[in-house]
Amino acid sequence: MVTGTSRKPTTRVFALSDIHVDMQQNMAWLQALSPVDYTDATLILAGDVSDNLATLREALTCVRSKFAQVFFVPGNHELWVRSKEYAHSITKFWHIVQLCDALGIYTRPAKVGEGAGDTGVWIVPLFAWYVQPEEGQGSLFVAKKGEDPTLQMWSDKYFTVWPPLAAGMTIADYFLSLNEAHLAQTYDAPVISFSHFLPRMELIFSTTEERRAADVLLQDRHPRFNFSRVAGCVGIETQIRRLGSVVHVYGHQHRNRNRLIDGVRYVSHCLGYPHERQQGLMRGAVDGPALIWETQMEKRS
């Protein structure tokens, strides 16, 4: 009898965000993902799928049929209220959480890949929003010459509706507070966290190496728009560090990054809009979700 040792993957986690399936080309891309390549894998879907709930349901049902587990947090687009169906964006948020529960999609921490010699990995969703500079501490704001501080071109300004909150509480505070129970939990395996919004200011800006790898002339096509006003908040980073995450996945900016900063790997893998891909701004997006975690076990034969 011949014996040998081979290795096979036991836990695979993929990342994806900002798929914007309201665009027919993006929905077709999603539906064309292999029905067999990911059946043992986990997908982290970090927001901005669709503000239309019927379309959101269709997209979530699609990915749920292709992956063993799917984790999701709403992005800013999901919380747009463009009809009278919801009184405000927080009501819609909780409806989306309930929709995910009904579809078997995780919006709360869960451990995947445990068993058969694999200790698994915890996936921890972090609800979040951005802090604008006028709201006080915690913003990722960096001043930009010639910007429009009123954000007239920013759709959230028109499509999100918020109820009165407790005195001194921002929208970001509200969503971050929903994560507190997860932060107090004990995790017995590595933690991968994810949010839609950015947790660190430096992630907004491309490095020299990233610009060189993109092989595209990056131009500021919206000189009056300052993304840092709506990028994210420091509170997300604080929660990442409290969790002890080894990887954090985020989206929102439509720029794909993979950086190791102070012991945490930050990954953004957005599909983005078709015209952005044509401009070379989302390198690697059309190849499929990004593999961000893989563990292996020995198998003897």
Image: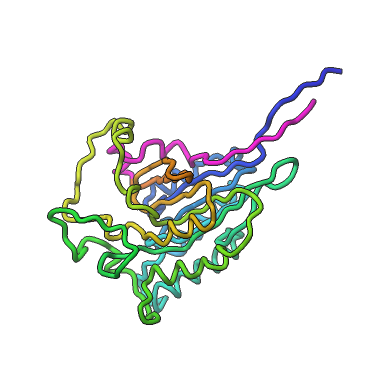
Along the line of sight, the residue nearer the viewer: 97 or 30? 97
From the viewer's perspective, is 59 left or right of 254?
right
Q: Is residue 29 above or below residue 83?
A: above
Q: Is residue 136 above or below residue 187?
A: below
From the viewer's perspective, is 193 left or right of 255?
right
Asked if the magenta segment contains residue 226, the reply would be: no
As drawn, the residue found furthest toward the front would be 262
Along the line of sight, the residue nearer the viewer: 170 or 154? 170
Instruction: Give the percent coordinates (x, y) of residue 14.
Output: 53, 44
- The residue at the point 39 percent across, 49 percent down is 24
Question: Residue 182, located in which quarter of the rendered image?
Answer: bottom right
Along the line of sight, the residue nearer the viewer: 4 or 19? 4
Instruction: Give the percent coordinates (x, y) of residue 261.
Output: 42, 44
- The residue at the point 45 percent across, 56 percent down is 195
- The residue at the point 54 percent across, 53 percent down is 244
Which stretch appears magenta?
274-301
Quadrant for the C terminus, please.
top right
Please state the total of marks drawn on the protein image.
Answer: 0
Question: Residue 25, located in which quarter of the rendered image?
Answer: top left
